[in-house]
């Protein structure tokens, strides 16, 4: 158990006695010590020493029998009493490594031979996570003691008394703190069953090792069905597997493009530079080479500077936010006096009355207040900001501000919003392709129009950005307070500049925003960084002193919003004769939160991606954004696309199951073909998804492995494997036409070095590195001779946010345009200096008074971006009259194989194979890093990461409050969650004519490919359900909502334990059919 206890760092610093004394109800250590019948020696200088059984040491929640001055001196664990004493540890958490348990336990039995059978002479069971303290399951122990060990092969009925005892010992009501009551009821029974199999195996091995005469005098061990042997497997006692990875790419030649500021041509013309006419990689270098990320050395050494690392300017103050504690309420009064007196060094507490400009901000519409005035609309809304000489004083002052509220009705989920009719009607959009009315009329006919039809609902949870660097801003007043310089961790320096000016009542030219690098953003700092930053800017302006604000992790998670949760309701049909898709009618709802933010375009992108890679002859999709009293949800890698893609694959999977065909074959059969048009009317050119699908199927040996998975599942009842293939296409462009523009400023210095400033921000994705490669290639110099300075609004103005995966396309091309302009000026000088190097040419140009600075500007071609929802589409007309939303599509396919523990819900990705079409990569290793990182982040979204807010479904959480607001409760993947074998390849010979040097955007598109894991898990669950329910049709008739947590996996693997857990706290069970239809709420 200790191998999985916390992490190496924690284990190296912590102590056993300290962990025992904290009396955590979910301690991994205490249940083990209890089941081992350990005793503690306690001692103090005043009263000497005493011994106490550890199970009597825990008095209640975080309360122990430890007198003042006493410490734990010794932990005594008895020796085993006989060779037939067996003990095993158990643990189930949201992830395997460095995680607190949902339920943990230790089980021990002492067996003895009695009358030709093995009897339980003594039993000990203790569990954590089942109450306010470690619980010894005394009833279950009593029911098991004296029982005959083992039953008929394949029959677990002999454990019925112990199962009933566990239910009696650890009753969990539906509103138990922590939730997951059914799952938590199931886990101790699952642990006991696993223990029974493991102990029978150990007993068999022990007897086999005895001399024949001695063994023959003892009863035989219980018989085990071979297929049940895998029940004993337990990740806690199994070796940690070593992981491996492969990255495959080809350094290709050609595909270079010339800069064109007009943005009018598509596709881009090939470069006419003679040096680029070759096909070898040298024709592109350093473009296309695996150049190391230019900040990597500083980042791994810890010397990279982020906002909070900037040396404090003289007189700098610290800020802390005063936040609403209510989801919806009228503000009756705000008393700042206690805050001002809270600690020495408190300078001011500022609110709306101190705003000299406007108190209203917003990403699209100004529907947010910087400081709440009359009402608050979510927990965590900013009311005031406390400013002090130290961070501790500012935080103490913020805590002491007294706000009186009059509570108002609150809406805290999509379902509650639907019931209340709470929507942002401005977001109501619809796309119709084909005659949906006639199709549905035919489908409603008695024969269903000859179609197989399905209806269903897919619920998809949100996701926390969990960037390593929380939101931070340093605002510095200059020139007597008349100007502001804002250093902010933001993807959107221009919006930060504009709103700081807007709130402070300054013109934009007196406010500049600078951003060197972010410690991650993932979309969370596209707009939600702004409302944090303006509080520091206002304080700096009012007090005429530098002010820094850096949010604590729990505050950042609680107030800045997450990925939008979605609900998709669908009706779809397919032709059973041809296996082809016929129609899809889908209704989509997202949780926007308490302000609009970017929820409109996020919902729009979901509507654009509902088809994924499949051709639906008739399709209608309608979207609505729900207005709730939760912090405003916002952009996150994929921007609504992954949610729709996941719904699409759910529908495909549902249809395949109903048709009785293999999901992989059904997917392949219904892929778009070259030249097909999407449901929004955009023709598909350079369509490579079928090629990716076929190539990864071959390279991953799909057919052989599918047979191996089927064989494994036939031989194992309690461990199952699943294999799934999932394609993706992701549209590249801002759907708002005006945002598809970017600028760059290039300086060439007389020593031959180049400085580039552009409008994009670096958040670890390698944008600056790629821009340096583009500039170096144009000038024919080393990448080391090119540098990108910080992103600053006083260098490149009016830049779009670094988002939509578009930044290399925009700023790489803008940089190329500027470089080519300078190169053109240098051409006459170079012609006079044959053989001269770049530095010599530059120096000669300087003395010839040639301008060595240029500004480059690039916008996407007008006919390849922009979609106008206001344009009506005639019935039966082509939706493309509204425009072309995307410049091109990044494409790919993934295959994942997983193994699940049907008794606990534990899962592991055995192997993941990915092929991505990313054109002709500018930097293949950076792009592969993006693919791997996106896949793992997507894996977290779909398996371990679950948000829990207080709503009607979660009465144990205060309304509107986020329960999972820190790493203790919210679980991103750990190292041990990565695939054991991960293989990534870039598609060869796939030049993209629509972007700089034939490359493609990479940041967001691979994220969804982790859905291959989700659907592989579903296939594994189906295999488990087939053993219980008999047929695939019955086994597949269940809804797996996202994320596929251990809870959802276990409760979907229906068996007698699940049926007992669903019955509540009595000794009975619900019918198996009822148990098979159970829908785990999770964060819903």
Image: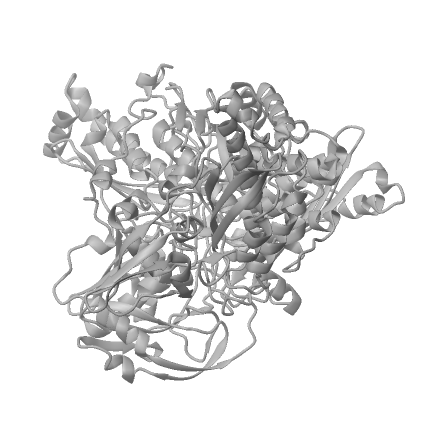
Residue extending farthest left = 847
Q: Position of residue 265 (x, y in %)?
A: 46, 33
Q: In the rendered view, tell whether residue 132 sits above or below residue 520.
A: below
Q: Residue at x 17, y 66 (%)?
A: 316
Q: In the rendered view, tell whether residue 566 sits above or below residue 711.
A: below
Q: Position of residue 467 (x, y in %)?
A: 36, 50
The N terminus: image quadrant: top left
The C terminus: image quadrant: bottom right
Residue extending farthest right = 446
Number of on-image labels: 0
Most foreground residue, 238 or 20: 20
106 sits to left or right of 670? left
Q: Is residue 194 visible?
A: no
Q: Position of residue 433 (x, y in %)?
A: 70, 43
Q: In the rendered view, tell whether residue 2 sits above or below residue 480.
A: above
Most foreground residue, 771 or 265: 771
The image's colouring method is one colour
Location of residue 350 (image quadrant): bottom left
Q: Is residue 896 visible?
A: yes
Q: Residue at x 69, y 45 (%)?
A: 1038
Q: Position of residue 980 (x, y in %)?
A: 44, 30
Location of residue 973 (image quadrant): top left
748 sits to left or right of 80? left
């Amino acid at each position: 158990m200790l191998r999985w206890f916390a992490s190496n760092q924690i284990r190296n610093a912590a102590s056993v006695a300290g962990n025992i004394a904290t009396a955590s109800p979910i301690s991994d250590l205490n249940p083990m010590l209890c089941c081992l019948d350990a005793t503690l020696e306690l001692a103090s200088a005043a009263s000497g020493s005493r011994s106490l059984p550890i199970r009597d040491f825990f008095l209640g929640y975080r309360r122990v029998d430890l007198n003042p001055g006493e410490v734990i001196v010794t932990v005594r664990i008895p020796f085993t009493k006989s060779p037939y004493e067996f003990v095993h540890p158990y643990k189930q958490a949201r992830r395997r490594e460095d995680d607190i348990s949902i339920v943990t336990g230790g089980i021990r039995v002492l067996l003895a031979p009695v009358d030709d059978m093995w009897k339980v002479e003594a039993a000990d069971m203790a569990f954590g996570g089942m109450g306010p303290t470690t619980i010894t399951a005394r009833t279950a122990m009593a029911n098991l003691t004296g029982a005959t060990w083992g039953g008929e092969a394949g029959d677990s009925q002999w454990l019925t008394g112990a199962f009933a005892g566990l239910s009696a010992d650890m009753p969990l009501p539906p509103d138990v703190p922590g939730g997951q009551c059914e799952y938590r009821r199931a886990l101790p029974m699952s642990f006991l069953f696993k223990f029974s199999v493991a102990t029978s195996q150990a007993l068999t091995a022990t007897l086999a090792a005895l001399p024949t005469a001695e063994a023959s005098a003892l009863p035989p061990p219980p018989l085990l069905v071979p297929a049940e042997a895998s029940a004993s497997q337990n990740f806690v006692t199994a070796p940690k597997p070593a992981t491996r990875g492969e990255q495959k790419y080809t350094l290709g030649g050609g595909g270079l493009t010339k800069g064109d500021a007009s943005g009018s041509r598509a596709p881009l013309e090939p470069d006419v530079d003679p040096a680029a006419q070759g096909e070898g990689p040298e024709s592109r270098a350093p473009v296309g080479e695996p150049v190391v990320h230019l900040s990597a050395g500083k980042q791994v050494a810890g010397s990279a500077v982020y906002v909070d690392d900037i040396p404090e300017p003289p007189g700098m103050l610290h800020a802390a936010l005063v936040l609403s504690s209510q989801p919806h309420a009228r503000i009756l009064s705000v008393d700042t006096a206690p805050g001002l007196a809270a600690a020495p060094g408190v300078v001011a507490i500022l609110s709306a009355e101190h705003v000299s400009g406007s108190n209203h901000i917003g990403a699209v519409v100004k529907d947010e207040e910087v400081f709440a005035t009359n009402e608050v609309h979510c927990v965590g809304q900013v009311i005031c900001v406390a400013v002090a000489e130290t961070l501790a004083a500012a935080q103490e002052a913020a805590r002491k501000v007294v706000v009186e509220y009059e509570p108002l009705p609150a809406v805290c989920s999509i379902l509650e919003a639907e019931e209340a009719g709470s929507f942002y009607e401005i977001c109501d959009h619809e796309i119709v392709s084909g005659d949906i009315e006639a199709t549905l009329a035919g489908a409603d006919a008695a024969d269903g129009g000859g179609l197989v039809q399905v209806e269903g609902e897919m619920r998809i949870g949100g996701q926390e950005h969990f960037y390593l660097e929380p939101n931070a801003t340093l605002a510095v007043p200059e020139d007597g307070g008349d100007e502001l310089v804002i250093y902010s961790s933001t993807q959107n320096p221009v919006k930060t500049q504009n709103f700081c000016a807007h709130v402070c009542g300054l013109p934009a030219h007196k406010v500049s925003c600078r951003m060197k690098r972010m410690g991650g953003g993932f979309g969370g700092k596209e707009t939600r960084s702004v409302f944090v930053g303006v509080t520091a800017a206002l304080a700096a302006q009012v007090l005429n002193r530098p002010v820094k604000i850096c949010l604590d992790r729990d505050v950042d998670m609680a107030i800045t919003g997450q990925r939008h949760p979605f609900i998709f309701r669908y009706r779809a049909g397919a032709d059973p004769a041809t296996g082809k898709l016929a129609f899809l009618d889908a209704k989509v709802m997202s949780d926007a939160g308490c302000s609009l933010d970017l929820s409109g375009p996020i919902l729009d992108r979901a509507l654009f991606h509902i088809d994924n890679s499949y051709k639906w002859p008739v399709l209608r999709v309608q979207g609505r954004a729900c207005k709730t009293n939760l912090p405003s949800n916002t952009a996150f890698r994929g921007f609504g696309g992954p949610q729709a893609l996941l719904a699409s694959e759910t529908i495909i999977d549902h249809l395949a199951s109903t048709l009785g065909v293999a999901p992989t074959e059904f997917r392949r059969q219904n892929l778009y073909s070259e030249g097909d048009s999407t449901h929004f009317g955009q023709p598909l050119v350079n369509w490579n998804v079928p090629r990716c699908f076929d190539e990864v199927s071959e390279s991953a040996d799909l057919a052989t492995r599918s047979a191996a998975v089927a064989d494994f599942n036939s031989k194992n009842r309690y461990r199952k494997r699943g294999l799934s293939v999932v394609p993706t296409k992701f549209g590249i462009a801002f759907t708002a036409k005006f945002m598809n523009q970017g600028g760059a400023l290039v300086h060439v210095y007389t020593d031959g070095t180049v400085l580039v400033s552009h409008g994009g921000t670096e958040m670890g994705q390698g944008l600056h590195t790629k821009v340096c490669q583009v500039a170096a290639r144009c000038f024919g110099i080393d990448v080391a001779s090119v540098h990108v300075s910080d992103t600053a609004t006083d260098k490149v103005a009016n830049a779009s946010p670094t988002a939509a995966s578009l930044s290399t396309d925009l700023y790489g091309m803008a940089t190329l345009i500027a470089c080519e302009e300078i190169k053109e000026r240098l051409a006459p000088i170079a012609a006079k200096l044959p053989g001269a190097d770049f530095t010599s040419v530059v120096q000669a140009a300087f003395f010839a008074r040639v301008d060595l600075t240029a500004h480059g500007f690039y916008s996407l071609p007008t006919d390849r971006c922009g979609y106008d929802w206001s344009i009506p589409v005639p019935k039966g007309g082509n939706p493309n009259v509204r425009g072309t939303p995307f410049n091109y599509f990044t494409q790919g396919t993934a295959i994942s194989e997983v193994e699940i523990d049907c008794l606990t819900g534990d899962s592991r990705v055995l192997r993941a194979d990915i092929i991505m079409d990313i054109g002709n990569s500018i930097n293949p290793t950076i792009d592969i890093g993006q693919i791997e990182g996106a896949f793992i982040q997507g894996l977290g979204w779909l398996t371990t990461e679950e948000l829990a807010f207080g709503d009607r479904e979660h009465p144990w959480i205060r309304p509107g409050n986020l329960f999972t607001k820190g790493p203790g409760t919210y679980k991103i993947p750990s190292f041990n969650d990565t695939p054991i074998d991960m293989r990534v390849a870039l598609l060869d010979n796939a030049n993209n004519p629509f972007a700089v040097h034939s490359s493609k955007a990479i940041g967001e598109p691979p994220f969804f490919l982790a859905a291959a894991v989700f659907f592989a898990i579903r296939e594994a669950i189906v295999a488990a359900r087939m053993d219980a329910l008999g047929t695939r049709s019955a086994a597949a008739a269940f809804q797996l909502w996202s994320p596929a947590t251990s809870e959802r996996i276990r409760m979907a693997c229906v068996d007698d334990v699940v049926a007992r857990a669903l019955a509540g706290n009595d000794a009975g069970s619900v019918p198996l059919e009822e148990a098979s239809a159970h829908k785990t709420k999770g964060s819903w």
